[in-house]
Amino acid sequence: MQSAVLTEPETFEFEERSRPDPGPTDVLVAVGRVGICGSDVHYYRHGRIGDFVVENPLVLGHESAGEIVAVGADVEDVAVGDRVALEPGVPCFECDACRRGEYNLCPDVRFMATPPVDGAFTEYVAWPAEFAYPLPENVSTQAGALCEPLSVGLHAARRGNVGVGDTVLITGGGPIGMLAMEAARVAGASQIILSDVVPEKLDRARERGADATVDPSQEDLAERVADLTRDDGVDVAIEASGAAAAIRSTTEVVRQGGSVALVGLAGEGEIPLDTHDIINGELDVHGSFRFRNTYPAAIDLLASGDVDVEGIIDFEMPLSEVTAAFERTDDPSLVKGMITVGD
């Protein structure tokens, strides 16, 4: 099989590798579509994200879906021919986090495209059947691949405790911000405000149902939110940009007793927050890391038509043009790119 391998920053090389054999509890999936995530781009540009360093050649790509072509001897719940979305993180099932049910916090998780675990920019992937979720006929392989970023959005909305009738601010109009907006809407939010500094992303947000948009480079975000909420502030702020200014703004725009969910990764790990705002306003500030127990819900939302993920895809390019695809991600007006591996 052909695999696109990151051998050094900004360098993909194609390698012919042996097609893997599924273990007893694994499935072998012919990869169909793989989304390009911001973390993939960061590894491509810099060869690392924080403490995760690409020291050996690495296959990127963790937002994937495809068709099962072989199953292990002990697999019962899925079969050859099933189209599936692959949840990219496999926990140990033995640590305290896993025992608590918080398997996304497992310190020994094997996560696709996170060194040293290879991802899905390859023709075939062997993966535990427990983390391969069948897709209904009316859910495309493209949409199935985006169950991963949708799951990030769903988890962020859960962490922020978004409920019926809530007013929600989402900072950042990239893939996670767009899908967090979808997650907030299906959770019952009555008013959704999205902020970004890229006009095309604000246009896209309005097209996708945002009640209001704000460009914080052109107007004061806190003042605009105050105008939109009759000086009360939003019930929930979901920070999905990673921009330091946006992170700092979250405690300024949330009402007293409101919630903040931080999901965007900043370039610097330490960013000052106004603790007076947090204490005096009795704010709940939550980190939101990846996701857990979200894929079934994500697939149900796609099947029902309640959530649209394909609408954030700006381009698809074949695996053979993976370098050109990654270079296209530099265009700030684009939200999502996707790699086509197979039909």
Image (cartoon, rainbow, N blue to C red):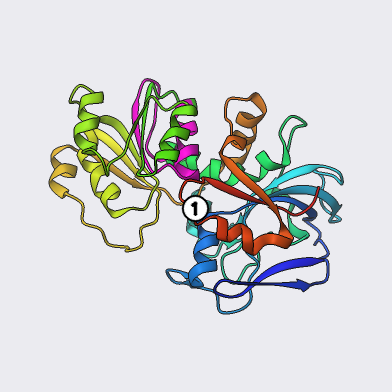
Please state which amino acid type lies under the numbered disc 1: Asp
Between residues 73 and 149, which one lies in front from this camera angle? 149
Q: Is 172 inside the magenta-drawn segment?
A: yes
Between residues 54 and 332, which one lies in front from this camera angle? 332
Q: Is residue 155 above or below residue 69?
A: above
Between residues 28 and 179, which one lies in front from this camera angle? 179
- In percent of width and height, residue 187 lies at 46, 27
- In percent of width and height, residue 29 lies at 79, 53
Quadrant of the snapshot with the N terminus:
bottom right
Q: Is 32 inside the magenta-drawn segment?
A: no
Question: Which residues are drawn in magenta?
Answer: 158-185
* Residue drawn at point x = 27 percent, y = 62 percent: 270
Q: Which quarter of the figure has residue 19?
A: bottom right
Q: Does residue 294 appear left or right of residue 24 in this picture?
A: left
Q: Is residue 243 visible?
A: yes
* Residue drawn at point x = 21 percent, y = 52 percent: 273
Q: Is residue 94 visible?
A: no
* Residue drawn at point x = 66 percent, y = 67 percent: 59
Q: Is residue 255 above or below residue 90?
A: above
- In percent of width and height, residue 204 lies at 48, 34
Badge 1 is on which residue?
331
Q: Does residue 312 appear left or right of residue 124 in this picture?
A: left
